[in-house]
Amino acid sequence: CVNPNDITLRNLGLYQFVGKGNPLRLFTPKLQADSILMKQFELALMQFENGCLEEAKFLFSNILEEYPNDVPSKYIAQYLNDRRMADYKKEQLKKGVIILSSK
């Protein structure tokens, strides 16, 4: 367990692992001291988790223009733009959950 208010951690969002019924919120240590990136990511993630998918896509794309090597932003942006998503994934997307399809 982690404290979600810990300022040394970066909230990566909700992920549902293969074979698990409930999604888990993932965190990673903040490796960059760039507060602008962190704030932009938090805003984009908030839009995603609130079901505002088009806004989230736009915000993650903007992040990648300024920070092309930010892996969490790149992963979520690619996930949101995946046109081959099954219907169940689309329902989970509206809830701000990323479904992992392999271990």
Image (spheres, grey):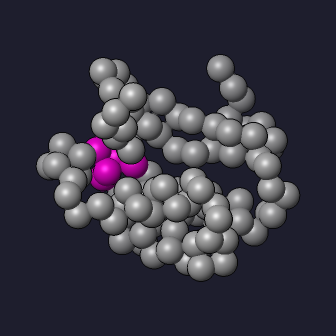
Quarter of the image for the C terminus: give it: top left
User: Residue placed at 36% from the left, 71% from the top?
Assistant: 54
Q: Is residue 6 left or right of residue 66?
A: right
In the image, residue 15 above or below residue 89 = above
User: Residue placed at 58% from the left, 72% from the top?
Assistant: 64
- Quarter of the view holding residue 8: top right
User: Residue placed at 34% from the left, 47% from the top?
Assistant: 95
In the image, residue 55 above or below residue 2 = below
Q: Is residue 12 left or right of residue 3?
A: left
In the image, residue 36 above or below residue 90 = below
Q: Residue 53, how many percent across, how many down?
A: 36, 64
Q: Residue 82, how many percent across, how many down?
A: 29, 61
Q: Is residue 35 left or right of residue 97?
A: right
- Is residue 39 visible in the rendered image? The answer is no
Most extreme residue toward the left is 87
What are the residue bounds of the magenta stretch? 91-96
User: Residue placed at 75% from the left, 40% from the top?
Assistant: 29
- Is residue 53 visible in the rendered image? The answer is yes
In the image, residue 14 above or below residue 46 = above
Quarter of the image for the N terminus: give it: top right
Q: Residue 60, how many percent across, how many down?
A: 51, 68
Nearest the eye: 76 or 35: 76
Q: Is residue 82 left or right of residue 56?
A: left
Q: Residue 44, how many percent across, how many down?
A: 53, 63
Instruction: Tell me, yes or no, whether the highlighted magenta stretch contains residue 82.
Output: no
Tally of numbered discs: 0
